[in-house]
Amino acid sequence: MSELEIQQWPSENERGYRIPVQRFGTIHPIKVVAIGAGISGISLAHDIQQYGEQVELTIYEMGKDVGGTWFWNQDLSCFLQPRHLYPGCRCDIPSVNYQMSWCPNPKWSEYYSTAVEIHKYYKDLVEKFGLRKYMRLSHEVVRAEWAENINRWKLTIKDPDGNCLLDECNVLINAGGVLNDWKWPDIEGLCDFQGTLCHTARWPADFDYKDRSVAVIGSGSSGIQVLATIQPEVKKLFHWIRSPTWITPGFAQQFAGPGGKNFRCAWLGSKLIQLDKLRYSAQRRHRGSEEKIRRRPSTCAQSELNERFKFIVQGTPEQKAALQFAEKDMRQRLNGDRRLIDAIVPTKFVVGCRRPTPGNGYLEALLEPNVYVYTEMFQRITPKGFIDNEGIEHTVDAIICATGFNTSFIPRFPVIGRGGINVQDRWKEYPIDSASILLIQSCCLDPLTPCTEQYLSLAVKDTPNYFMYYGPTGHGSGAPMIEAMTKCFMQIIRKMQVENIVSMQVKHKAADDFNEHRELYLKRTAWAGQCSSWFKPGPNASPVMFPGNRVLFIELLTNPRWEDWDYEYGYAQNRFGYLGNGFTMREVDGRDTTFYYGLLDDKDEQPDYTDLRATYAWM
C-alpha cells in the first residue's frame, strides 16, 4: 500500500473525533503525587518502581524523615538520634504481620516489635530499594484543588524555608494517615503546671521519671503501654480510668513461644523457618521454596487474625467464647479487686465494640502499691499537681498526657473537588448528638463524622482522581491492608494510562449503595453496641467500619468494580479511542501473538518475524 493511499484514509469525523495514532495497549505517561512517606507511601513507591511504566511519582512528606507515625511519635528535637519514643511504644500485632510481604524481616528481635525497630525496618526498606529519590522531605502540602479545564490537581506545597511551591498531577493519593496530628488535651490548669509536662506523641529525650511521682492521663493504647512500662521505676503513679474497656492479651499471642509468653524474640518466625528448612532440605528445592519459608510466619499469624472477625458478629459462638475468655482473664489479672473490676470490666458492650486493647502487664501494674487509680476525673491541674474529685490536692513531679491523636478522617488541608466542594467541609456537615460531643471532648478526642460520602474507604464523591489510604471504613491491621490498597491503586493507574482516562470519580449511586449496605450490616456486629471509640463517635452513632472481614475487603480491592465509576477520556470523550490503529502492542513488544492457544514453556514470547517486518512497516 502506497503512502498516498494511507494519507487518503479519513482521519476525523464531523464530531471532531480522530483515530489515535497508537496501538492497543499503549501506556500513556501519568504523574502521581502522594502525600506522606509513611508505610503507605513506601508501599506505593516500591510498587510504582517495580511494576509501573511511564509513571512519574513525587511523594511530599512534611517530616524530616520517612516512617510516618513511627517517625512522628518521638522527640524530634534530637533528630540525629531519633530513638526517644515513649516507654513501651510498640505494635500490638505480631512483628511478622507488620512488614511488607516483598521484604520480610527474619530478624525481628521481639514478637511485638518496638517502635524504634519498626521505624528502622521501614527506613531500611527505603534505602535498600532506592525509594528516597521519589520523596521530598520537609515539604508539606497545604492545599489541593481540582482544575477542571486541564483535568489535573493543582497543589500548593510549603518547603523547608516556608516558601510556597506549586505542582500539578493527574492523580493525587493521600497517604498521610491519622496518627500524626496530636494535641494537648483541653484540661483546666494544664498550662499552669510547673513540673515536667509531656505527651506520648512527643516524648522528651531528657525526661527521667525514675523515683518520681507521675500522673498518667489517658487509658487508651499509649496510656496502657507507658503505664505498664514505667510503673516499676516510679515512686508514685496516679492514673484515671473513666470508662470500661476490654484489656486483652496480645493479638495472636498463642504463637509467642510455649505458653504464649516468649516476647523477647520472634519465636514463631524462627521456629517455622527452622522446621521448613529441614523439610525442604529433605527434598529437591524448587522455585519459590525460599520465599515460602520467609512468608510462612506471616501467613500463620495472619490466619489467626483473620479468624477474629467471627467474634465481631453478634450471637456467634466465637463472640460468646471471646466474651467469656476476656471477662475471666481480666478478673483473674485484677486478682478479684472489686473496685477495679467494676471500673474497668465492661458490662454494657461485648468484646470488639471498641477495639480490644492488648495490655500485657497493665492490669497487674494497677494492683501495685505505688499505683493510685481513680475512677472519677480530677477537678483541675495546679502548678504543683492536681486536685482530685474530692478536692484534695496531690503533688506530682510530672504529668504524662497519653491522650492520642485527632483520629478524624477529615483531610489536614483543603481538598477542593468538583464544584468547589471542599472535602473538609463535606465531612464536617454531618451532625453528632450533643451527648456524644460531650463524651468525645471529655476523652480529649476530636469528633468523627459518619463519612457517608466515601466509597470503599478509598475515594470520595465529586473528587476525581483523588484516592486515600485507610480512609473512612478502612479495615484491619496496617501492612496487609496497605499492600492491598496499593495494588488497587496500581490497577487504577494502569487503567487510566491504557485507556487514556483523564478523570474518574465514583458514582454517587455506587457510594450510596455501598454505605446503605454498610450501615445496615453493621447493626449485626459488636461495633453497634453501646460504646464509643475512635471509629464510633457515640454509643448510638453509626460505626465508621467496613461491612465484613479483612479477607472480603482484600478480595474486593483485588478485583475493582470498574462499573462504579464515571470516566472522562482524552480521545474526544470516546471510550474506545484506546483501540487505536487496530493493532496491538503485543505484536511489537516481544509477547506471543498466539497466546490464546496457551504459552509454550509458560513463556509469553513472540516468534522472531524479523525477516517479514519490512513488509508491514506501515503498521
Image (tube, rainbow, N blue to C red):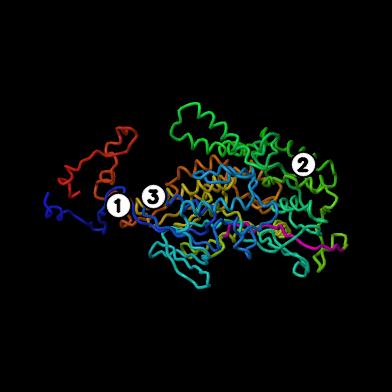
Is 316 placed left or right of 2 in the picture? right
Between circles 3 and 2, the one closer to the viewer is 2
Q: CA distance from mark 3 to mark 2?
A: 51 Å
- Residue 414: x, y in percent? 53, 65
- Residue 503: x, y in percent? 40, 57
**Mark number displayed over residue 495:** 3
- In reply to whether residue 348 is colored magenta, the answer given is no
- Residue 591: x, y in percent? 29, 41
Whichever of labels 3 and 2 marks the residue nearer the N terminus, that label is 2
Q: Amino acid at mark 3?
A: Lys
Q: Main secondary structure of the magenta part?
A: loop
Mark 2 residue crowding within 10 angstroms, few (<14) / some (14–19) / many (20+): many
Asked if disc 3 and disc 2 are in contact, CB closer than 8 Å, the reply is no
Q: Amino acid at mark 2?
A: Met
Whichever of labels 3 and 1 marks the residue nearer the N terminus, that label is 3
Q: Nearer the viewer, residue 582 or 484?
A: 484
**Mark 1, secondary structure of its residue:** helix
**Mark number displayed over residue 577:** 1
Q: Which residues are magenta?
A: 393-410
Mark 2 lies on residue: 330
Q: Nearer the viewer, residue 250 or 452?
A: 250
